[in-house]
Image (spheres, coloured by chain):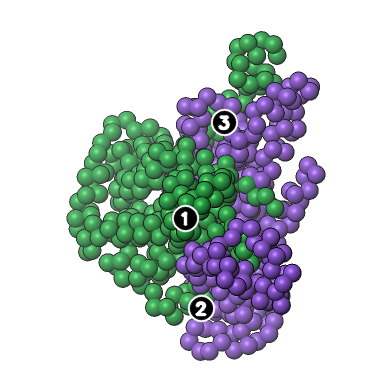
Amino acid sequence: MSNIDIPSQRSGTMAGKAKASAPSWLAVKWQIMKAHKHSYILMSPYMLLFAIFTVLPVIMSIFISFTYFNMLEFPRFIGWQNYSRLFLEDDVFLIAIKNTILFAVITGPLSYIACFVFAWIINDLRPKMRAFMTLIFYAPSISGNVYFLWQMIFSGDRYGIANGFLIKMGVLLDPILWLKDEKYIMPIIILVQLWLSLGTGFLAFIAGLQTVDKTLYEAGAVDGVKNRWQELWYITLPSMKPQLMFGAVIQITASLAIADVSIYLAGFPSVNYAAETIVTHLIDFGTIRFEMGYASAIATVLFLLMLGSNLAVQRLLRKVGN
Amino acid sequence: MKMALTLRKKRVNRSFAGTFWMSVFLAFVASFMALPLVYAINAAFKPLDEIFLFPPTLFVRNPTTSNFIDLMTLLGQSWVPFSRYIFNTFFITGMGVIGHVLLASAAAYPLAKHRFPGSKLIFTVVVLSLMFTPQVTAIPNYMVMSWIGLIDTYWAVIVPAFAFSLGLYLMKQFMEQIPDALLESAKIDGANEYRIFWQIVMPNVKPAWLTLVILLFQMLWGTDGNGFIYSEQLKTLHYASNQIIFGGIARAGVGSAVALILMSVPIALFVFSQSRIIETMTTSGMKD
């Protein structure tokens, strides 16, 4: 027991040694943990906050979703009622699900591919140009809520850029109320979301491309790789798999959480709920109607949807190339 | 292909036509990406009569700084001194960034360099938390905040930012590439874990710090209080500027000026730290 306090990096060998002599599995674990007490101390402040602000709320949300809760009275257990109401009675929620999935299916893969394709093209540029182009593509995602600028571009009167331009070209005679017309709301939000979506994933791809071993390309050229497309498929993509997985998580999660753009551009609620998403529905019930149990059920559905699609895509990507 | 090789020795397998068309494509999309930002810059310098010109113009003809002067006048009249909003945002951003970099690095070091009971589980949970957004936990978060008594304080925004999971993830991945030999030798020299962390690990992960700084800065610079802050004197710059931006037609010029100022700060920060951020992102991959 005396030599246990020396921190060891090789807990595996220690566990092996201890197992031969120590009495119980629990005691062995405890000794290893004691040996690593500095690690736990270093982690504890972060992990405490992480538990309080991320782990605990997820668990609470799942529990609250089975109750009726209005923030004033103590939550009352009502079983699956929130969920049955959500899927069987709430027509707007079904629109929200439809919109969310539509947004995700379009912006998710498109933004993912865009992140990669532009990172790939930019990577071939000279360093100065590369830095400049990276900035151009990345800037929208870091400049805060500048997407309100799109509101000026798609403004419903003829002073809006889009209307003014189209009227001048003779395409339109009268201005279109872009953001009040159900036909146009979804495509505009998708466009703006794509504009915003070259963020962390894009940077990860740029970085990933720079780490691909240069000698692989030369070796590939000798082995008969004929053009850039073959090079991309046989050399670049397989070497970047870890970044591709990371980028997928970032893009999928973002594509399922579309709400701010919808609220800013289409209004809240949007015309005939044309731009309602799961998140805006959640905001509606959580911050306006104060039906916290019901809102938590929406949050839980969103949680499962995000986690499920991420894990599914991870599994899929892991298979690629194996 | 031989010619391409002699022309640009750098890369093989690049046809001239392919490069040309890809450059055209890139330029086209880049101008789409830049359009709103170019518009924002120009709008901020437009005199009032140009803002409502028909047909609308993209580029300013008679640039003026009157929007910025109007902004100053407007700021002088606000009920809470405008400097207070600026202070609030700087305080929240500064505290959040410093706290997050310190706490996330401290947690990332053992996760990257040691194996101990629970380390794998903890990291898995952190990765899982990248897979959903904060909206999922908004309601319980509010309850937790009110239990701890942080509602309507700066800390309601700052403290959760400490535990931002993407920062920990990137930091941990970056720390893994520090050679073990370096840490071993420090240990032989008699340094304890805390000294190794502070004097060996931290100076070696400067690019990762910068990345965390940028990510957090971006997040906190644009915060409107996340629904936790109600007192006018505690509200953020972003909140105040939104009120100007949504002031409608009369504020169109001033709104553009505010927008330009707000967005130029994170962009400038990125310009200065781009290469360090890219360096950090090289280790961002997920290795099962």
The residue under label 1 is which amino acid type?
Answer: Gly
Residue position marked by numbered label 1 in the rendering: B190
- Give the left or right position of residue B39, taking residue A317 as reference: left
Q: Position of residue B43 (x, y in %)?
A: 35, 40
The mark that comes first in sequence, 2 or 3, is 3
| Residue occupying the point 36% across, 38% down | B41
| Residue occupying the point 27% across, 58% down | B87
Q: Position of residue B15 (x, y in %)?
A: 67, 18
Using the image as rendered, state which of residue A158 and residue B221 is in the foreground: B221
In the image, residue B202 sits, relative to residue A173, either above or below, namely: below
Mark number, residue A122: 3
Q: Residues within 10 Å of mark 1 (few under 14, many from 20)?
A: few
Q: Helix or strand or loop: what does disc 3 sit on?
A: helix
Using the image as rendered, state which of residue A176 and residue A211 is in the foreground: A211
Task: Give the chain ID for the purple colour.
Answer: A
Residue position marked by numbered label 2 in the rendering: A290
The residue under label 3 is which amino acid type?
Answer: Ile
Q: Colour of chain B?
A: green
Q: Check the residue under mark 2 and report the chain it is in.
A: A
In this rendering, the label closer to the viewer, 3 or 1: 1
Using the image as rendered, state which of residue B252 and residue B273 is in the foreground: B273
In this rendering, the label closer to the viewer, 2 or 3: 3
Q: Residues within 10 Å of mark 2 (few under 14, many from 20)?
A: some
Q: Quadrant of the N terminus of chain B?
A: top right
The residue under label 2 is which amino acid type?
Answer: Phe
- Give the left or right position of residue A251, taking residue B272 as reference: right
- The residue most toward the front is A2
| Residue occupying the point 47% across, 59% down | B192
